[in-house]
Structures are given as structure tokens and as C-alpha cells.
Image: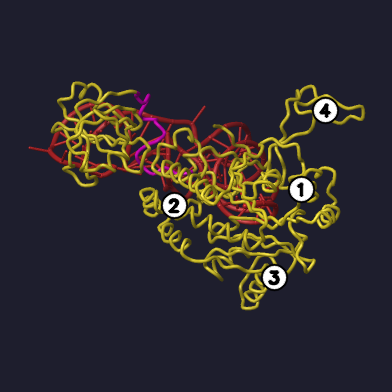
Amino acid sequence: MIDLSVADLFRASTTAVGKAVRLKGWVRTRRDSKAGISFIQLTDGSCFDAAQVVVPSTATNYASEIQRLTAGCSVIAEGEVVASQGKGQSVEVQASRVEVVGWVDDPDSYPIQPKAHSFEYLREVAHLRSRTNTFGAIGRVRHCLAMAIHRFFSERGFCWIHTPIITGSDCEGAGHMFRVSTLDLLNIPRTPDGKVDFSQDFFGRETHLTVSGQLNVETWCAALSKVYTFGPTFRAENSNTSRHLAEFWMIEPEIAFASLADDAQLAEDLLKFMFTALLNERPDDMKFFADRIDKECIARLERFVSASFERMDYSDGIKHLEAAVAKGQKFEYPVSWGTDLQSEHERYLTETLVGRPVVLMNYPKDIKAFYMRMNDDGRTVAAMDILAPGIGEIVGGSQREERLDMLDRRIDEMKLDKSAYWWYRDLRRYGTVPHAGFGLGFERTILYATGMTNVRDAIPFARTPKSCEF
RNA sequence: UCCCUCGUAGCUCAAUGGUAGAGCGGGCGGCUGUUAACCGCCAGGUUACUGGUUCAAGUCCAGUCGGGGGAGCCA
């Protein structure tokens, strides 16, 4: 008797015929033939497909237990692998014994039924939605992509840097932050002038959850040359859209002795590596997404990995948009050099004009962050966004300003507190070097790969405004 | 935060201001190996909540709560 996962069973297929095996998992459906046979579809999450377990009426618990099995029951099935008489699977398990490990209380209200549920409903039962076809597939796809990311960087000599979740910088500059505090909210200590006395807080200062690992990872880039972060990050923005989470995962590489062009090439190589791995390693799940969620998703990835990204200057992007307007294209918001592109503008460039991912580079300095490197023209910075059809901005990055005098000028221009950046500025004082990096939103990447349309369904437990049930 | 929209059985959805229904799921029975099996019967409802208009409200009006979509912000 050998223990097998369902994936093992199908991998072995007909070579396993005749072997005695044990499967452990959950009942997806049960179908009866009163002639004396029940069919159990058993899943254990190891692959998309369920195994068919055939239980004869001669089983000692056939009437007492087998015929009472409903969706969601957990079972251990022992039996012989046989070639399937039916269609739909190469092999099945002819059970000699099925032990019921866990029953489903009140089967008529078990939330997960063998039918199509809306994603909105499944979010309300997030502790059980992992048992569905869709979310099982998402779980495996998410893992596959995460491992591909680590493999890509490791093979190229990058070190994974575990940047902190809690930060003492309130200068990370990407939106509202979640406060971290152990102060008693009912009895807040005050300074003589009435302000909150954070010197009595846990860290002796004001602290928050990080909104980006970038500033910290730059310090390690200035020593290990090629580094990246991959972890959760937190934004307390009141964003209610299908593309925003309060807690999401981001990949942020940082490379030394590198330009904006190197940065864009790294992003392109990474994305292609990830999607190639996905197509190779999860064909079962991708077939499901193509069948039931988005019939274009496999073709889109195949196109993605074989086509080069379009590279376009921000200024040229504006020219294309203005030309489109002149030809009758309607936008809700006006297009002009110096303003940030609206979603509709980004969509036009990547979906209508190019039809492929677009790397948009060299943005006006006034709409970008202080740390981005000033170009020689004095009006643009070495920033890039990668826009993907259907998703919008998937990558945002830049070459960093490595010249201390230029960095200080930008900090002053933006009226930021120079002293708060003392250690970040030190990197420019001690052996500074041109360097660049970007941030890749992990959940948005999963949407692009699978054809799913809401990031709340691309993460096991979504955190959004007014929602943190699980 | 703003705009739009939705809330009816465990789930997916019907119901012109006039007796709340179907499919799936569940229970029971039938069916000689099924593939989200099939056939029959049965059970299952504070129509999100509060108030209002009306002879009469699931339906119209106001408010509240919740879900979703779009915008902004961003990844």
C-alpha cells in the first residue's frame, strides 16, 4: 500500500495499474448507480483534476456511510489502481475500503456546492473558497509564479533581501500608511504641548507598516549589487477598485551599476520567465482558466513571451495620444505634456495603439517621486511604467538619483524633510553608484496571467476598506 | 472619498403595484459504470434593515447597512 497524491496518480497513469494505493482528500461529488456502485470525485489540491474512486456496494460501510457522503467530506480511500472503464480519466481507484474522516454538518447549507458560484459570494466564504476549482487553480498558479520569481533571480545571482515590515520612516511617500502602535488608545500619553507622545510608544518613535521595501533594499543593493524584495506591503488608501488591496505582495528588484534601459530589460526578462514557467508547469490550471474564465489567456501569454515590449518615451506617448484625439478619438480627460496619464490613456496606448505591453519612459519630473534620476534635459526623470493590455500599470520603476546634490535639490523642491532621509542620503556620500529598480504588483500579474478580473480573487485573503473578516 | 448599480430559498436567478416561483443543492424513492449523471416526489422565505406613500409594496419614496462596477490614488 503506497500513499499517493492525486497528481502522483495521474502522473503515473497506466503504469500504476495493479498497484495498491491510498488517497486522502475531500469529496467533490458523489454519483450513485443502484446497480451497486458509487463514484466519488476526490480532490486533494495537488492538481486540477479530481480522482475517481469507485466504491462497490459490498463495502462494509456502503449503506451506512458511502451513500451519505456529500460535497466537502474528507475521506481516506484505499484500493487498486485500474484502467478506467469510463471516459474522462485514464485510471481510477477501485476501492476496497473508504474511511470517512470528517463529515459535513448540515449538507443542505454547505456553502460550496458542485456548481458555479459567483466570486462575490465566494469572498464571503473565503475560508472555504480554496476548495473550488477556480481558487484551487489560483492557489497553484500563485505558488508557481512565486517560485518562478525566486528561481529567476537566484539563477542570475540576485539575493533575496528581507526588508522590514515595520518602518520608522514616514517618508516612503506612497500614500497613507497603517500606524503601528502599542499605546493605549483610551489613555494616550501627551507631550506638554498636547501632541501624542510617541517616545512612550513601543519603538520610542512613530512607526508604520511599510508601503515599499525600496528604500531599504537600496542599501543592500549598494553592497550586494543585485538584490530584490518579495513580500507583503501595505497601503491605507481608501481605494475601492478591482485593482487595489490594502495588503498586497510586490516584487522589487534593485540593480547596481545599471541604467533605466537595464531596468526595463530586467522587468521584461522577469515577466517572460514567469509566464513561460506558468505555461510549462501548470497546463492543467491554465486550461481551466482558458475554458471557464478567459478563453484568450493562454494565447495572450504565448504572445507575451515571444514578442518584445514596445519602448516609448512619455513625450512620444503624448504625441500619439494627441494624434489620436486629432483623428477623433474621444477621451474624458484632456491630454497634455506634463500631466499624468489617465487610465483611459494608458489603455489606448497598450490596447489600441500597440496591442502589446508598452514600456513608457522618461516622465516629467513634477509627476514622479523625489528619488528618480534627473535627465539631462532638466525636465524629465528616468522613470518607467510598464502598461499591460487589460490591466494597466503592472510595473513602475526608475533609475535612482545617485548624485547627492541633485537628490538634495529634489528633496528641497518637494519640501521634504532632508533629515528624515539621512541614511538614504548616506548611500550617495559613500561610494555612490548608478542604480535602478522597479516594483511589480504580484496580484495584478496573476490577473493578467489567468484572466481573472479582481485582485481580491488573486490573494488567499483579501484586505480591503471595511473588510477583514478572515 | 465621489458617481453608478444591486440586495428575493443554502446557491444562481424569475415575479406589470394585486395568491412569492424555477433550476441547482438537500431529504426520500427509482435507475446495470457514472463524469457538475439522469427521472419522480418532498421540505425549504422576516423579499438586507428602518420608516413612509397606497385599499394593497419584493416592486414606488427616504434613510441606513452590505456587495459589485467605474473614477481618483497606485502596484
Q: Is residue A237 left or right of residue A116?
A: right
Marks 3 and 1, the one that precedes in the sequence: 3
Marks 1 and 2, the one that precedes in the sequence: 2
Q: Residue at x 66, y 58 (%)?
A: A258
Magenta stretch, overall SS:
loop
Q: Which residues are magenta?
A: A102-119
Label 2, residues with CA under 10 Å away: few <14, some 14-19, many ≥20: some
The hue in which chain B appears in the rendered picture of the protein? red
Give amino acid for label 4: Ser
Q: Which residue is mark 4?
A: A199
Q: Are marks 1 and 2 on the same chain?
A: yes
The hue in which chain A appears in the rendered picture of the protein? yellow
Marks 3 and 4, the one that precedes in the sequence: 4
Q: Are marks 3 and 4 on the same chain?
A: yes
Q: Which residue is mark 3?
A: A315
Q: Tags 3 and 4 in contact by the CB under 8 Å rule?
A: no
Q: Secondary structure at mark 2?
A: helix
Give amino acid for label 1: Leu
The x, y position of residue A37, in whole percent, is 17, 33
Q: Secondary structure at mark 3?
A: helix
Pair 4/1: label in front = 1
Pair 2/4: label in front = 2
Q: Are marks 4 and 1 on the same chain?
A: yes
Q: Which residue is mark 1?
A: A427
User: For residue A277, which numbered disc appears in the image?
Assistant: 2
Q: Is residue A436 left or right of residue A142?
A: right
Q: Chain of mark 3?
A: A
